[in-house]
Structure formats: structure tokens, C-alpha cells
Image: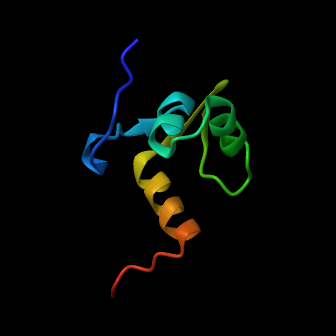
Amino acid sequence: MDRKEYTSLEQIPLFLDADCLALVLGISRAKAYQLMHDETFPTLRIGRRMVVRKEQFIAWMDKESGFLPET
């Protein structure tokens, strides 16, 4: 199976599942699921499926990294 790579934020899908999240962050699928179960992570549950919206994921990354956008 070919491994997909994202080279820009525009290429990331609107909703990230655990597989996509693992790929984007460079972590294992198990770690991605662990992160998605964390209360501070913006996971959206649809039945048993867990996803995160792209915009919320980017905002979470900015917050966790201490990035403060210029105002």
C-alpha cells in the first residue's frame, strides 16, 4: 500500500480520522486513537466513529505549540 503524504495544510481532508491523524502527526495509529480519546482533543463522535475537523485540529496544534497569531 502506498503511503500518502501531505505537503501542505490545503491537502489535509476536511475531517481527519485516526489513520489520517497518525499520518499527519507522524505517530502510530494506536497513539492517534489515544489522542482522540483525550478530553482536551477536539474529537467529534459520529456513532462509534471518531474524527476531528481540520480547522479544529489546526487550532489545537497552534494552542499546544504555543503559537499565537499576530493581531
Q: Position of residue 20 (x, y in %)?
A: 47, 33
Query: Residue shown at 46%/75% (left/top)?
Result: 67
From the viewer's perspective, is residue 17 above or below residue 65? above
Left or right: 68 in relation to 46:
left
**Count of marks, rendered view:** 0
Left or right: 19 in relation to 55:
right
Of 2 and 51, which appears nearest the observer? 2
Query: Residue shown at 64%/53% (left/top)?
Result: 41
Q: Position of residue 69 (x, y in %)?
A: 38, 79
Give the image quarter of residue 13.
top left
Give the image quarter of residue 65.
bottom right
Q: Quadrant of the N terminus?
A: top left
Q: Position of residue 37 (x, y in %)?
A: 73, 42
Query: Residue shown at 47%/35% (left/top)?
Result: 23
> Which residue is situated farthest in the top direction here?
1
Q: Position of residue 35 (x, y in %)?
A: 67, 45
> Which residue is situated farthest in the bottom direction here?
71
Q: Quadrant of the C terminus?
A: bottom left
Colour option used: rainbow
Query: Residue shown at 35%/27% (left/top)?
Result: 4
Of 64 and 48, which appears nearest the observer? 64
